[in-house]
Image (cartoon, helix red, strand yellow):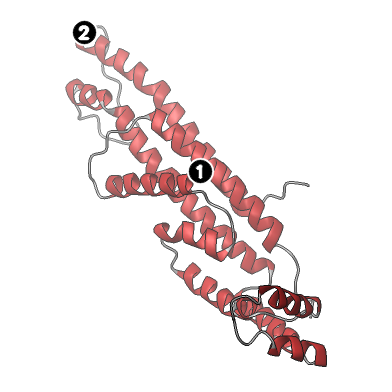
Amino acid sequence: MNYRKSKAHERHKLAVQQAYDFAATVCYAVPHLAAHITAVDAGQAVLQPPHYFAPQNTTKFLRDNITIFEERLASYMLLSLFSFFEAFVKDIVQEMFDFHGGTEMLLTLAAKRDQALSAVGQSHDVQVAKSKLTKNKQGKHQKYQKYSKVLLDAGFRFPTERLSSYGVRMLIERHKNLKAHAIPDLLVHGFAMHMSAAEKTQFESIREKRNKVAHGRHQKIDLAYIRTVNDFFRGMTFRINTHIMEHFFVVEQYAY
C-alpha cells in the first residue's frame, strides 16, 4: 500500500525540522561564545556585539546563561514539539473535513446515509428477524446470532450505526475547541485508532511536563529527553496520518 501523506503531516515535519535546525545552530554557537568569553576575560579579545540586542550585558551574565543553556533550550523545544503535535492533529482533522467538502457537507452526507439505510429492513424476513431480537434472554444466543445474520445480510443498520451521524456532529463540535488532554480520546473513540495504555501514559507525562514549563515551573530536562519526546511524536504522527488517510479520506458523496 502506498503511504499517503496529508498536508498536515508535511507541515508538521517541516516545523519540527526547522526547530531542530535552530537548536543545532544554538549548540554550535554556545561553545564558541564560551571560548570567546574566556578570551575576553583574559584580555585577549573584545566582546563582540550581539545581533539585535544592545551590547550592555557582562561576560558574567553571559557565562551564567551558558551554564544552563541546554536546560532552557530543551524547555523551549518541548513547548514547540508539543504545540506542533497539537496543531498536526487539529490540522489533519480539518483537512479531512475539507476533503469531504466542509463540515456542512459532511453532516449532509451523514444525514443522507441515515435516510438511505433507514429504508432497509422492510422485507418480511427482516421484520421477522428484527422482532426476534426485541428481547435479550439468556440461553438463546445461537438463535440471536441466526437472526442477526439475517439483518446483516439485508444491510440492516443496528443501533450503534444509527448513532454515527451524531458522532460526526460531535466530532465537528469537539474539533472547534480541541484541548490537548482530549487528543487520545479523539483518536481512540472518534477515529477508532488503537492507542496503547503505554502510549496514553507517555502522552500524559509529556503533556504534564509541557504544562509546567508553559506556566513557568522549573523542570530539569535535557536534549536527550527531547529526543525521546520527538521520537514519540514522530511515531504518533505517522500512525495518525496513515490511519486517517486510509479510512477517512475516501470520497463518499456518490455512495447514496
Q: Position of residue 53 (x, y in %)?
A: 29, 35
Looking at the picture, tell me which residue is in the foreground, 59 or 245: 245
* Res. 73 in view: yes
Name the spot of residue 20 as percent of width and height, x first.
48, 34
Q: Position of residue 6 (x, y in %)?
A: 65, 53
Instruction: Please tell me which residue is depicted at 26% across the width and 16% down the height of the picture.
Output: 37
Q: Amino acid at mark 2?
A: Gly
Along the viewing direction, whichever of 61 and 256 lies nearer the viewer: 256
Q: Residues within 10 Å of mark 2 (few under 14, many from 20)?
A: few
Q: Which residue is mark 1?
A: 233
CA gap, disc 2 to disc 1?
Answer: 47 Å
On the picture, is 254 further left or further right than 35?
right
Q: Nearer the viewer, mark 2 or mark 1?
A: 1
| Amino acid under disc 1 | Phe
Which mark, residue 43? 2
Q: Earlier in the sequence, mark 2 or mark 1?
A: 2
Q: Secondary structure at mark 2?
A: loop
